[in-house]
Image (spheres, rainbow, N blue to C red):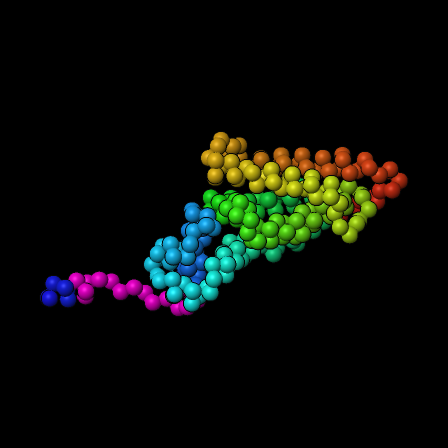
Amino acid sequence: MRRKAAATRARPKQKRLSPDDRRKEFVAKATEFFSEQGFGGGTRDLARRLGVTQPLLYRYFPSKDDLIQEVYRTVYLEPLDTGWEKLLTDRSRPLRDRLQEFYRGYTKVIFTRKWIRIYLYSGLKGLDINRWYVGIVRDKILTRIIKECRQQAGLPAQSRPTAPELEMAWVFHSGIFYYGVRKYIYESPVLEDKEQMIGDAVDAFLAGYERVFGQRLPPVMRTPVTAVG
C-alpha cells in the first residue's frame, strides 16, 4: 500500500486545460491524425489518439463534420495573411516583384507535409473543404492577379476573368503548388532554390499572359499603362 501511495504521489499531475486550450489541442491533434489517416479515420480512433473518450470529444465537436470544418478554418483560412491582398494590388511596385513576394509568403504556409496531405485527402474524399479552398484561391488570389495582369498589359478592365484567363492562372498557380507535392509528398528531387523556381514561374506566366491575351486586341484598343511611383 505504501509503495502504491508513493507511486501515486510521484506521478506528475496533468495540467488542467481551459476549454479554449483543450479545443485548440483537439484541433491540432486532429489535424495530425487526418494528415496521416485521411478523413476516413473514425472519431473513436481519433479520441484514442487524443487520450480522451468519444463523449468528451463530442462535447467540443458535436459531429465529425464540425471537427473537419474547424480543421479547415485553422489550417486553411487562418494562415492566409490579409496583407497579401494589399500586396497584390500595390501598383507602386512592379507586378513581378509583387507576385514573387506573394508566392514566397504563400509557399511558406502551404509547403508542409501536413498541409499538402490534408489538401489531397480532402480532394480524394470529395469533401467540401477542398472545394471551399479552391473557391478562395480562384476568387481572392487568381482573380486579383488577372486584374493586375490586365492593367500591366494595358487591357480593358472587365468585371470577371474570362475562362481562358483563369485556366492560364490555374496552370501557373498549380505548377508552384506541385513543386511542394513533389518535394514533400513524393520526396522527388526538385530545384532546391525555391526563390528561383518562383521567379522563373512568374516570368513565364507574365510573358505568356501578355503574349496570349495582349495580341487578341488591336493596339488602338489598349489602354496606355501610366508609370506609378
Whether residue 212 is visible here, answered yes or no, is yes
Point out residue 43 in the picture as x, y percentages from the top left corner. 41, 57
| Front position in the image: 19 or 45 | 45
Residue at 35%, 56% in the rendered image: 48
Q: Tell me which segment is drawn in magenta.
A: 7-22
Can you see residue 84?
no
Q: Which residue lies furthest to the left in this view?
A: 2
Q: Residue at x 43, y 47 (%)?
A: 37
Q: Where is residue 160 in the image (x, y as percent from the top left)?
A: 75, 50
Asked if residue 69 is among those painted magenta in the image, a careful observer would answer no
Counting from the top left corner in percent of width and height, residue 212 is at 76, 35
Position of the N terminus, as image quadrant, is bottom left
Which residue occupies 29% across, 64% down? 14
Side (left or right) of 146 relative to 50: right
Identify the residue at horizontal 56%, vertical 56% (top origin): 77
Above or below 162: residue 52: below
